[in-house]
Image (tube, rainbow, N blue to C red):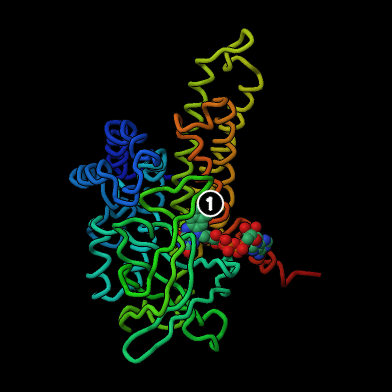
Amino acid sequence: MFAELSSKAAELKDRLEAFMTAHVYPNEREILSESSRGEGRWNPHPVVAELKQKARAEGLWNLFYNHGPEGQGLSNYEYTHLCELLGRSLAAPEIFNCNAPDVGNMEILSTYGTEAQKQRWLKPLLDGEIRSCFAMTEPRVASSDATNIETSILRDGDDYVINGRKWWITGAMNSACKLAIVMGKSDTSAPKHQQQSMILVPMDAPGLTVMRPLSVYGYEHPPLGHAEVLFDNVRVPAENMLLGEGRGFEIAQGRLGPGRIHHCMRFIGLAERAIEIMCRRALSRTAFGSKFADMGGVRQVIGQCRVELEQARLVTLKAAWAMDRHGNKAARNDIAVAKIVVPTTAGQIIDRAIQVHGGGGLSEDFFLAEAFAETRFLRIGDGPDEVHREALARAELARHAETAH
Ligand SMILES: Cc1cc2nc3c(=O)[nH]c(=O)nc-3n(C[C@H](O)[C@H](O)[C@H](O)COP(=O)(O)OP(=O)(O)OC[C@H]3O[C@@H](n4cnc5c(N)ncnc54)[C@H](O)[C@@H]3O)c2cc1C
């Protein structure tokens, strides 16, 4: 399963690492600092805009994309190695046009969009000129079961009319966000998984209101934000429908596979960096006459972090390899395993690094507190752990159904 990286991927990886060192880490604090930006925080950060141009000029752009010449044509297995690097900083993904939720939306438009939809929305997304959001979750219903979604998308002449309320819509606060991919029901009398559709909605469509930002442990994640969004008789042309009425569930499955594994790849990088700074801290501080690095308790923690991170990396690499080898659908169980293992493992490692840093670990002086919040969110986002365990159990039990006695 484990192959050497191609020379192209290895060369990109080296250049990405050099770029991170020269431009991302030195600007990270300024980019992520929320408090200093006030009302303007929902506008693209000027430093990010500058670094995006630089990254693009250096060919470090759309690293995830393998649907055409706008990307680098890497396999999922190869991209895992690069994505781990850019996952080391929460400021990095957008600089290389590899950030959620735009990546998932670009995948959707590439796979299911018409030529006209691609020209209008995919091209500016691949160029990093606009941003987008994906609107599925609703405050009124348990949205981990997507069949509960209540937003309506109803045909009216040459248009569709959309009514509903969404929340936790990442990216919707951003002034550069121009497109929402909205999931709703177009036919409540159809079979359970054919009631849903996805439709393209310009953010400036009359009746679409971004109501308020939500925060994760107090982090608002500007300029993206996570918003509550109201759709009140929003009217869009019928050609904005993706793939066709009743195909929303099918698209959602296609989108979430790669999206989930990209989060896992990034978290491996985040946890790796947490171990690094935990070790540096342990080597530089002394209490009760001993260096932390000489204390048995701290050494056990560091060793255990290495064990768990290697396990998490292996399941992520295996899922990426299975996607390349067998396709996203056949790899869904491997993706589910990684999606359960990695956020929990990365969260535990980061939490231990916080502990070794004492009070400093909870402050904004280190990246740890925000990184912990990020890993905690992913035990719920893109499907809670329980839902993935349930899917795994279903698959396991089905394998043994015929030999039950
Ligand atoms: C920071 C952040 C960003 C997000 N970004 C987006 C976005 O961009 N777009 C979007 O549409 N959504 C987004 N979400 C929403 C996220 O996808 C949902 O929160 C998630 O799918 C769970 O839905 P819910 O919140 O309605 O929880 P519920 O469906 O109410 O579930 C609550 C809990 O019930 C338990 N549970 C559910 N099903 C089972 C089961 N089968 N077995 C056992 N226990 C179960 C789980 O513990 C689960 O956490 C985001 C969320 C967060 C926190």
- Amino acid identity at mark 1: Leu
State which quadrant residue 155 falls in: bottom left
Residue 175 percent across, percent down from the top left: 30, 57
Residue at the image position 51 percent from the left and 82 percent from the top: 195
352 or 366: which is nearer to us?
366
Question: How many numbered discs, if any?
Answer: 1
State which quadrant residue 13 falls in: top left
Residue 131 percent across, percent down from the top left: 31, 58
Q: Is residue 132 above or below residue 339?
A: below
Q: Say which residue label 1 marks.
A: 378
235 or 339: which is nearer to us?
235
Q: Element under label 1?
A: loop
- Disc 1 Cβ-to-ligand 1 distance below 8 Å: no
* Residue lying furthest left: 57
Specify whether residue 90 is in view: yes
Specify whether residue 322 is in view: no
Q: Is residue 323 above or below residue 311?
A: below
* Residue lying furthest bottom: 157
Residue 404 percent across, percent down from the top left: 77, 69
Residue 356 percent across, percent down from the top left: 57, 25
Q: Which quadrant of the render holds ligand 1?
A: bottom right
